[in-house]
Amino acid sequence: MAHAPQIRIPATYMRGGTSKGVFFKLTDLPEEAQVPGPDRDALLLRVIGSPDPYGKQIDGMGAATSSTSKTVILSKSSRPGHDVDYLFGQVSIDQPFVDWSGNCGNLSAAVGPFAIANGLVDAQRVPADGMAVVRIWQANIGKTIIAHVPMTGGQVQETGDFELDGVTFPAAEVRIEFLDPADEGEEGGAMFPTGNLVDELDVPGVGNFKATFINSGIPTIFLEAEALGYTGTELQDDINGDPAALARFETIRAHGALRMGLIKSLDEAAGRQHTPKVAFVARPADYVASSGKRIAAKDIDVLVRALSMGKLHHAMMGTASVAIATAAAVPGTLVNLAAGGGERDGVRFGHPSGTLRVGAQASPVDGQWTVTKAIMSRSARVLMEGAVRVPGAPAA
């Protein structure tokens, strides 16, 4: 059997917020991968190095965590009022599938810089110095994101003094606005899909929990830390080193997904790892972050821990941050109550790597809560650019 040479595909490896991913221009992909389907999925799986039964992704660009097993496809937008179309693929580490069911909020910070650098934004809309405003269509969920990208000397400014807990080195700040982030996707219904701010979630064999189900940023199930036997100050090893705990969270997630209308049977949850997320909240408390930094209760409004792709996240997903901001802004949700209750347009929460402030503009309209915008700051940086190589199909 003849062996085909490797395929060379132009690509950029970027950090966005606390995530990393491989970025492609749609037109640079092989023709068969320029449309959704098994050929595209197979290519991205091979780029990242999945499925890997060893769980290491040694033979690919992934780094064996949910934060680093990510791909992005960008194209110039034909949609009025938008510059670029952004499609996100969360690649499973050990299973042969790519989850297209949601956005990555962290990598959203890298979309604007990539789009400018790769000519996807009209030149007249990009100042030589100052702030470029990039209008992004998030194709997974059908939402608009506005990125404010700093420019210096006609180039995207990547260095700076903005610090983000969960990222070791400072960089330039990229402010992101998620417009009308609620009612994500076509399956989950309204911002609060059950119509309630707090529900009872009965999980056979696990327990009965108060839960806030929300579609904003990404479908998320919020629980109370105390009801799960936690304090809200846990770090990754406290959860990820406990297989029984991870199995319990996955069971809760499956039942929550069913309750939210995201799946029709519990069996479907295994093929939908990216959404919904599960998070638990608690009132502020002192703790030591994973970096050794001491976080004081007086410096935060609420504690939040969230799981992504079956593991406790090392910081906080950007889309889950939108869910946190929205839920905190609505009086009576579990997030709002843990933060002290009342009306608020911003919240600073503690996560395993430190703290983050996020804001949301929420208000009741015709008896239903709506959110017009969620805002946060991230940073982004090109780590490597050039091409990735993947083995071609063997010749007959």
Image (cartoon, rainbow, N blue to C red):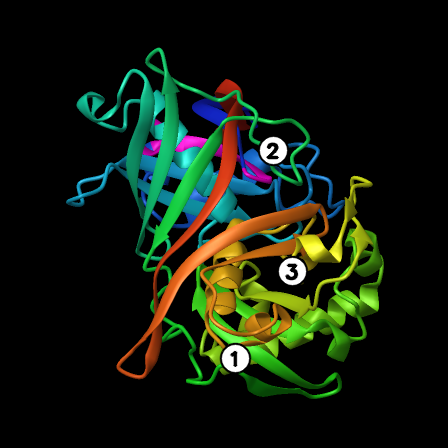
Q: Secondary structure at mark 1?
A: loop
Residue to which mark 1 is pinned: 332
Q: Amino acid at mark 2?
A: Glu
Q: Residues within 10 Å of mark 3 (few under 14, many from 20)?
A: many
Q: Amino acid at mark 3?
A: Ala
Q: Amino acid at mark 1?
A: Gly
Residue at x 77%, y 61% (from the top left corner): 285
Q: Is residue 377 visible?
A: yes
Q: Residues within 10 Å of mark 1 (few under 14, many from 20)?
A: some
Q: Earlier in the sequence, mark 3 or mark 2?
A: 2
Residue to which mark 2 is pinned: 163
Q: Residue furthest front?
A: 298
Q: Secondary structure at mark 3?
A: strand
Relative vertical location of residue 134 with respect to residue 223 in this rendering, above or below: above
Q: Is residue 29 visible?
A: no
Q: Which residues are magenta?
A: 17-30
Q: CA distance from mark 1 to mark 2?
A: 32 Å
Q: CA distance from mark 3 to mark 2?
A: 21 Å
Residue to which mark 3 is pinned: 306
Q: Earlier in the sequence, mark 3 or mark 1?
A: 3
Magenta stretch encompasses residue 213: no
